[in-house]
Image (cartoon, rainbow, N blue to C red):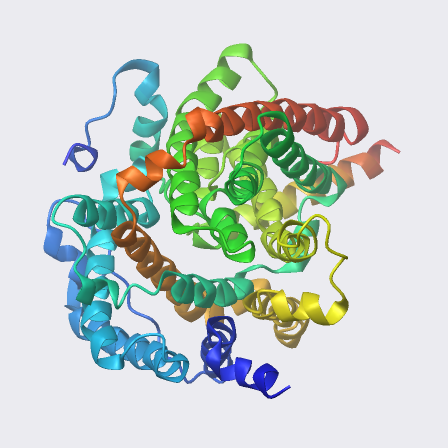
Amino acid sequence: MSKGISELWKEEDWWAVWIGFIIIGFTLLNIVPKIPKVGKWTDNPLAAFQIIKDGQVIGGNLLPLLGLLAGLLILTAIGIAAMKTVKISHYIPGFIVIFILACVAYWFANQVNVKYWGLSYAMWALLLGLLISNTVGSPKWLLAGARTEYFIKTGLVLLGCEILFKKILSLGVPGLMVAWIVTPTVVIFMYRYGTKFIKMKNKELAIIIAAATSVCGVSAAIATAAACRAKKEDLTLAVGMTLIFTVLMMIFMPIGIKMIGMNHILGGAWMGGTIDSTGAVVAAGSMLGADAEQVAAVVKMIQNVLIGLLAFVVAIYWVCFVESKPDAPRPNAMEIWYRFPKFVIGFVAASLIFSFAVVPAMHGDFNLVEANYINPVTKTLRGWFFCLAFIAIGLESNFKDLASRMEGGKPMNLYVVGQSFNLILTLLMAWIAFMLLFPNSI
Amino acid sequence: MFFASGIFPPGIAGEVLRHNQAENIDASPLLYSEVEHMQKLEQRVKQMRLEASKSRENRH
């Protein structure tokens, strides 16, 4: 029993929950100031570190960024000290450099023309880390600060605040049909296809690719990878694939839809249900017109809400069926609890608290909750934790390991077949929902 | 450097990218909460559904 209690301050999962909820608690008490970001820039690279209001430079954000570095360092170092996974004196220099690299990744991503391509900070962070590890190599002192799982899990607890359940009703029954019937079907199909049909040995990679393809790309990949305790290389592969295909689908889907003259609402719902990241969905939808953009974005938003549920189900499934030996008896409730990734509880709890306590406390005004708590604090901090995690993943990965996980192209086979199935099923469901059953719903 | 240059592929391959530039659309958000004008998009969908529901009632 004593081991059970000591888990609370010795396990990374619990520390992610504590740090996440310390931030959430202070945010709700309005103690946390607005979290600084690396700004957008066009021609002047230094503009990313200036605060500009109405075209006038009113200050710099280097000092606030230093404050953020100090804050994150203190918060995460408390956990590191309690867990004793690495010496604090080793953790501090590594973390500082990883934070600087995260700023560089954001700086790349925030160039205006880069944003038009849909290339997010996650990609730049991953590339930056990979570039270092595969050229000069990642020094030991730097790797001491690369606490990938710790950053991901803390980021996921904060992500829970953005997953507001009541949003699923935004498009009524047709929206639910497209987002909530197709998505689980595609996840199950892809996982079965990957593990049973093409016999992928790496079940974690199969479920991460399935989640990324059917839910919402990078974010779903992160949540699922953490829930099934996948290797970093698996996440890198899945994220790489989803980022490349997202750009391709954003470029070619609206052109195809326009060429065949498909109804724009149907086209919007189709793209919303299939293109992986929300930004690319908005861009592709906008090509078809304002109505399509709105429907596409809201379908994607409804799908986004599934992340929490998916992470929870995958965590339970892994504990009960994948991690246990085939001839062993089913684990009992205590064993499931013991092996369950506890940060998922923090993630789901944050989502439930925001959905059913914070939003009602603000008279059901989502906009107010987003403007007061999510946008200025939890969302930005979640982005920082994910960016730190992707830098760390890149630093810890090398191309040789990545190539060894390709299993003769099976992951790519899974992505292509799964995405094709997703495209067909989503189109069919969107047609049934928006054209056949509820033709005048919108 | 290439991605930051503002040079996009010619023809239909660059159509969406040129549209993003013309309309200043950020295509990089990973989640709905990162889309700057998401509230506006949600609001408009709400309005579209209300208008559709009114027109259905009028027809009845």
Residue at the outermost right position: B60
Q: Is residue A169 above or below residue B12?
A: below
Residue at the outermost bottom position: A2
Which residue is found at the position 62% from the left and 57% from the top?
A315
Front-most of residues A102 and A339: A339
Q: Is residue A135 above or below residue B59?
A: below
Residue A58 placement (x, y as % from top left): 17, 68
Residue A306 placement (x, y as % from top left): 63, 50
Residue at the outermost top position: A260
Residue A346 placement (x, y as % from top left): 57, 70
Q: Is residue A328 above or below residue A42?
A: below
Q: Is residue A21 at all visible to an observer of this figure?
A: yes
Name the quarter where the C terminus of chain B is drawn: top right
Horizontally, residue A312 falls left or right of residue A53, namely right
Which residue is found at the position 39% from the left and 50% from the top?
A232
Horizontally, residue A187 falls left or right of residue A143, namely right
> In the picture, residue A134 is in which quadrant?
top left
Residue A99 placement (x, y as % from top left): 24, 65
Front-most of residues A378 and A241: A241
Q: Is residue B23 at all visible to an observer of this figure?
A: no
Horizontally, residue A341 falls left or right of residue B54, namely left
Front-most of residues B9 and A367: B9
